[in-house]
Structure formats: C-alpha cells, structure tokens
Amino acid sequence: MKSVRYTLEIKNKEVVELIKAGGVEISVLEVVDLLKNEEDEGYAVCPVKTIHAFLDGLILERRGPNDGPAKKISTSSIDNNVILRKLRIAFEMRDTDVVETMKSAGFLVSKSEITALFRAPTHRHFMECGDQFLRNFLRGLTIINRS
C-alpha cells in the first residue's frame, strides 16, 4: 500500500477513500498507523481485507465498475500474485506493458514468464510471484508514472 501510495503521489485521505470504495470503513488515523514503518511507534499491521479493499478501490477509481459479474477472490489471504494481478487490472496493463515496466526498473523478464504469473495456481506452468519481482514491478511503475 505504501509503494502504490508513493507511486501515485496520493495523500492519506485519498487512501481512505480508496479503501472505503473497496468496501472497508477506515479512518485517516488508522491509515497513518498502517503506513508507518515497522520500527515506528504506533505501527499497525495492515489486515488482508484492507489490502484487498485498497486494491479494489484503486481498480474502481482508475477503471470504473466492472460491467459483468465480478470474479470472487477470497479475501482471507493475499499473495504477491493477487497483488500483481490487481495492480495490472488497475493500471490497464497487457503482458507487454508489464515487460516494459520491469525493463524500466532494470529487471529483464520474458512475456512467457509474465503469463505464468497470471495463471491459476493449479496450472502446471503457474509461477509464484516473489517479493523481489513485485518490488521491481512497483519500482518500474514509479519510474513510468513519475516521468
């Protein structure tokens, strides 16, 4: 949440609005605690439901409501693949856009590697999205959105 906030240069109040649009009620003070560093006093761990709400709100703000029935994704857990998928939807990116985003962060990746990240976990070519990959994706988004 911190990285996306930095990338888009949005304020805490806007983060609250995105989370509310995603279906979770939260105050600005709670968001401030969620955005603190782990070693800071008052730091709060961000609940999974809040992360989903933030990403869903971001999708709604950037793309508008879905025309058809929404896919149900369990909000009981979240992993890097789900985060990457929701960011890709929010920023309306194709596989080639993700490749270019990664390239701008100095991380070379092929289109087939990208498609493997978006497959169902049961698919034999599914690939788990690592922390380093997600960090570089967010860095690439920042470079692209701030240039």
Image (cartoon, rainbow, N blue to C red):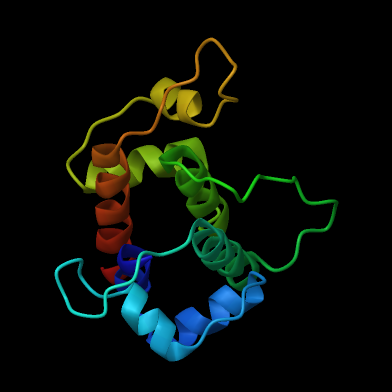
Residue 55 position, x and y percent, is: 53, 61
Closest to the observer: 140 or 56?
A: 56
Task: Residue at 44% x, 37% y: name it.
Answer: 96
**Image vertical order of residue 125 relative to residue 60, above or below:** above
Say above or below: 141 vs 81.
Answer: below
Residue in the image at 36% along x and 64% along y: 45
Tell whether 26 sits left or right of 41.
right
Q: Is residue 82 left or right of residue 137?
A: right
In the figure, is residue 141 to the left or right of 41? right
Image point 26% across, 48% down: which residue? Answer: 135
Asked which quadrant contains residue 108, the reply is top left
Q: Is residue 136 above or below residue 114?
A: below
Instruction: Pinpoint residue 57: horizontal percent, then vertical percent.
Output: 60, 69
Instruction: Please determine whether, in this image, residue 47 is positioned above or below residue 121.
Output: below
Q: Position of residue 21 (x, y in %)?
A: 64, 76
Q: What residue is drawn where x is 53% and y is 45%?
A: 77
Q: Position of residue 35 (x, y in %)?
A: 31, 74
Q: Quadrant of the N terminus?
A: bottom left
Q: How many marks?
A: 0
Q: Is residue 20 left or right of residue 114?
A: right
Question: Looking at this rendering, what residue extends furthest in the top direction?
Answer: 124
Locate the C terminus and report the quarter of the image it occupies.
Answer: bottom left
- Residue that extends furthest to the right in the rendered view of this protein: 68
Q: Nearer the viewer, residue 19 or 84?
A: 19
